[in-house]
Amino acid sequence: MPRVRRIVAGAGAVVLAGTLGACSASDDVPVLTWYINPDDGGQAEIAASCTEAADGAYQIETSLLPRDAASQREQLARRLAASDRSLDIMSLDPPFIPELAEPGFLAPVPDDLQNTEGVVQGAVESASWDGELVTVPFWANTQLLWYRTSVAEAAGLDMTQPVTWDQIIQVAEDQDKQLGVQGALAESMTVWINALVASAGGEILEDPDARPDEMRLGLDTDAGRAAADIIGRIGSSGLGGSGLPTADENASMNLFQGENGSFMVNWPFVYPAMQGAAPEVVEDLGWAVYPRVDAETPAAPPVGGINLGVGAYSEHTDLAWQAVACIVSPENQAQYFVTNGNPPSNTAAYDDPEVQEKFPMADTIRESLDLGAPRPQTPYYNEISIGLQRTWHPPNAVNPDTTPQTSTDFILAVLRGERLL
């Protein structure tokens, strides 16, 4: 199988029915279309602000992508493979960037945007492919360990120091509480597996540059078995609740807000959400960096967020990069965090007084993003992620003695064309 993959069979000839329509430019002002992921309107506000700042050089209009990341990937991949010229600026989920960069679907990032000083390390890594910055970090995301201070105090845990998964599992068992984790057959399962493997000092994909038939996975290792042990124990003990096999981020937040809540790993969106839905829980709320797998090894928290890329076939690549520079300014990132709850990739934005006031855990988020480990950076991410989900689900069936090897065999067979997802 060649290293440069065909993203979607026949994609060069077929474009999704009902794809997003390109915006028509006025006679004298070029219109740049920014394909955005769903939010609370913050990207449209930034587009309007940057249009005003451009003073007639260009106009930015937004076009909404589907809500789930997999559908976003499919739509953008098909359009790029079809040399769609309307793809000026794109909000891209980090795991799918190598798949778009490898075949040359992304315009090169200009020199003036290559400087990553002041950008959190997790965002830089997720914006790169093959040792090169191929997109520009916009907002970054990471999971924190959220906890009920009353539960931690009753257990005698010093939450100013790193805690381990073994510790929080033990506390939940001793106090007959439950843990908020994401066990659904979805991307959130891959996020959990990757964070555990990386926190144990391993990597799911050991050689991302290798051909599919030469790839080596780091699942059937001490790190992979440690990850499987944690997921299996939480699943089989019922600590994740009866709904764990279908639990996404919102479901685990709801579990945490209940009377049996104790600890939860989740993204920062939960803080404003709980302020509105469960103010009594917020009064008992604490936060810390992601749990460690091994007490002596720093955690490698999940990294997410959105990076901005410019389509290689855009008619206005230079203007598009100018617009990107405006969009990702620290001022816009800080405003986006305050209004939409999406953390900045630029550390300067965390010093904004309004950010510090609205998100008292902002410094912990910044620390977590510097520790974070991206999911496997590879053009074959889709196969690896779905392969993990199929073989590590449901959580109560995960066994450290068998799951890592079974998962390895299945994913490698898929990559070699011997099995189908």
Image (tube, helix red, strand yellow):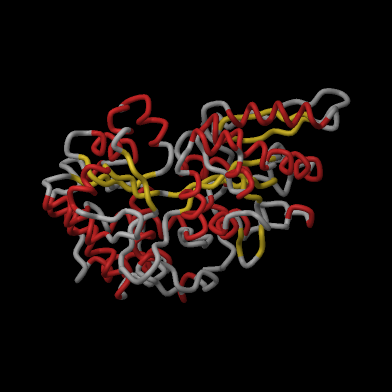
Q: Return the x and y of residue 141 as percentages of the image width and height.
A: 49, 47
Q: Is residue 239 left or right of residue 289?
A: left
Q: Nearer the viewer, residue 46 or 396?
A: 46
Q: Is residue 162 left or right of residue 373?
A: left
Q: Is residue 417 left or right of residue 389?
A: right
Q: Is residue 102 visible?
A: yes
| 129 lies above or below 278 | below
Total number of numbered discs in the rendering: 0
Report the quarter where the C terminus lies: bottom left
Q: Hey, which residue is sitting farthest right in the picture?
A: 28
Q: Nearer the viewer, residue 214 or 36?
A: 36
Give me the residue at 66% from left, 63% from top.
132
Q: Return the x and y of residue 56 as percentages of the image width and height.
A: 85, 27
Q: Return the x and y of residue 24 as percentages of the image width and height.
A: 75, 25
Q: Return the x and y of residue 69 as percentages of the image width and height.
A: 47, 42
| 364 lies above or below 281 | below
Q: Is residue 421 visible?
A: no
Q: Quadrant of residue 352 in the image?
A: top right
Q: Is residue 31 left or right of residue 242?
A: right
Give me the residue at 17% from left, 58% from top.
233
| 78 lies above or below 119 | above
Q: Nearer the viewer, residue 395 or 381?
A: 395
Give me the residue at 21% from left, 60% from top.
398
